[in-house]
Amino acid sequence: MKPLEILSAIPKWKSATPGQIVDSPAFALACRLGETPDTLCLGAVEVGDALDLSVVFGDEPHVLRLARSPRFKELDRIWDSRADVPEPILLALAEKDCGEFFQMLENAVRRQMRLAGLAPAGEVSGGGMLFAQVADVTFALTRSDAVVSAFGSLRSLDLSHPSFREETLPAETEYAAFALSAANLTSLAVGDALLLPEIGSVPPRLVVDGRFAVDEKGVSPFADDGRCRILAAEPRVVSLGELFDAAENPRRVEGDAPGQLRLVQNGKTLVNGRLDKVGDQNAFLVESTAN
């Protein structure tokens, strides 16, 4: 599995709405400004002195507030006196200067964009705007359903952001998995031993959140097949960052030296025990039955 596939399998993010994704501190939409790859980031700082434009995506009107930027050379030259510039000339300068930026917005919203004119002052509302920046351009755009739906994809999230990497999931260390008949299971008693040749010869694996299996091959979906599983008695936690790293750079899982263990089937602990020896073989020694 790739990191994005992992994220998509976690209920919290699988069910996330576009609005929740857009409001995430990890939002970082990959885009291109001209020929240069860049990132569109959202922020909480309102655009101050701005050129307020009416733009249309498809057939839906929006307001675009564009801050002064040295990237827009002609507009920058007349910025302080733009109130005296006739609207047709001002719009022509915007079309000429901001072509690459407008194309980036059109691609991001995934609808054809048209510059319709200057926005009347009454149409500019801070509460209904998304404040954003890409490269050296700061702007605000109407927070419409169309814009939020286009921006709010899981692919728009920066998985290296601390808000993801520091999130933790419960995990279990699995040392062995095997089939055992119902008769043998029900007859297990204190003092019985089950040979575990896997321990010491097969590296353990992690089962994370009951959804992911992590081993030297990487991360794969976990499905409980009903076999008996020998797990470490104590659970552990794994960060999403560790899970993403294991997916990108698979390596052998290093478990703690097996001590207290439990035998689990279908998610239920049946007996508790510890690692012991029978002759020269590793074995699970039953110490108590689960209540």
Image: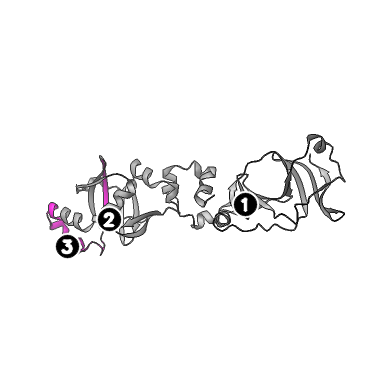
Could you say whether the residue bearing mark 3 is in a helix, strand or loop? helix
Q: In the rendered structure, which amino acid carries the disc numbered 3?
A: Ile
Q: Residue at x 82, y 34 (%)?
A: 183
User: How far apart are the alpha carbons under marks 1 and 2?
Assistant: 43 Å
Query: Left of 225 or right of it: where is 92?
Result: left
Number of residues whose C-alpha sits closer than 10 Å to that of mark 1, classed few (under 14), some (14–19) or many (20 or more): many
Please give the residue where the numbered disc 2 appears in the rendered image.
Answer: 101
Disc number placed over residue 90 in the picture, else none: none
Q: In the rendered structure, which amino acid carries the disc numbered 2?
A: Phe
Disc number placed over residue 214 in the picture, else none: 1
User: How far apart are the alpha carbons under marks 3 and 2?
Assistant: 19 Å
In front: label 3 or label 2: 2
Number of residues whose C-alpha sits closer than 10 Å to that of mark 3, classed few (under 14), some (14–19) or many (20 or more): some
Could you tell which of marks 3 and 2 lies nearer the N-terminus? Answer: 3
Q: Residue at x 21, y 58 (%)?
A: 97
Percent x, y for residue 249?
Answer: 56, 58
Query: Left of 160 or right of it: where is 226?
Result: right
Could you say whether the residue bearing mark 1 is in a helix, strand or loop? strand
Disc number placed over residue 78 in the picture, else none: 3
In front: label 1 or label 2: 1
* Bounds of the magenta segment: 60-89
Q: Residue at x 41, y 44 (%)?
A: 19
User: How far apart are the alpha carbons under marks 3 and 1?
Assistant: 59 Å
Query: Left of 7 or right of it: where is 89?
Result: left
Could you tell which of marks 1 and 2 lies nearer the N-terminus? Answer: 2
Q: Is residue 133 visible?
A: yes
Q: Is residue 43 visible?
A: no
Percent x, y for residue 253?
Answer: 65, 57
Q: Is residue 291 above or below residue 204?
A: above
Q: Residue at x 42, y 43 (%)?
A: 18
